[in-house]
Image: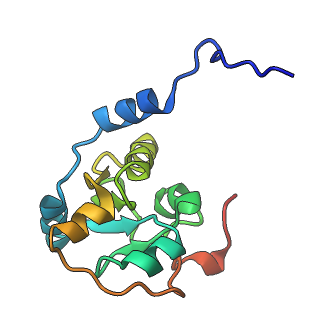
Amino acid sequence: MKRNILPPAGSRGIDEILAAARSRLRRLSPIDAHAAQRAGAVIVDIRPATQRSTHGEIPGAVVIERNVLEWRLDPRSDARLGFADGYDLAVVVVCQEGYTSSLAAAALHDLGLQRATDVVGGFAAWQAGGLPVEAGSPGRSDPAAAHGTAE
């Protein structure tokens, strides 16, 4: 059976979705993200445990895996983390290469967190820039995992 390869009317490809997400953000270089962290911004690492274990972690970053990000940071959510108690929270999302983090930061904008952004080039660019990195901890996970997921 031949598959329909024509996109449905009104659909958008991932390149268009990514460009739209990034147009809403003031993305940060790794150096600027590090400065923002030192000034009080929360670095949120959304990478899976295997990537964090293999490549390392940003010291002080909060680990929130992508599948529960919105629930953990929405000030309206019963599953939010304690520090996510207002809409003026400065959040810098990090993934491995800087693609998924753009989509995640745009989703945080949709929640009202207008200061959310991401790192151009992701963790790989952070590390390549010589910024602080620590060995990944295979057991480290979402600090609110004990509360269950909102899936």
Residue at 57%, 61% in the rendered image: 68
Residue at 32%, 37% in the rendered image: 22
Q: How is the image coloured?
A: rainbow
Q: In which quarter of the image is residue 44?
A: bottom left
Residue at 28%, 41% in the rendered image: 25
**Which quarter of the figure is the C terminus placed in?**
bottom right
In this view, which residue lies farthest toward the front? 1
Q: Is residue 70 left or right of residue 88?
A: right
Q: Can the viewer see residue 133?
A: yes
**Which quarter of the figure is the N terminus placed in?**
top right
Relative to 39, residue 9 above or below: above
Closer to us: 130 or 93: 130
Q: Can the viewer see residue 89?
A: no
Relative to 11, residue 18 above or below: below
Relative to 47, residue 113 above or below: above
Q: Is residue 44 left or right of residue 10?
A: left
Relative to 29, residue 35 above or below: below
Whole-percent x, y for residue 97 in the image: 35, 56
Whole-percent x, y for residue 78 in the image: 59, 64
Closer to us: 57 or 68: 57
Closer to us: 41 or 118: 118
Please state the total of marks drawn on the protein image.
Answer: 0
Q: In this view, does 98 lie to the left or right of 76?
A: left
Q: Quadrant of residue 29?
A: bottom left
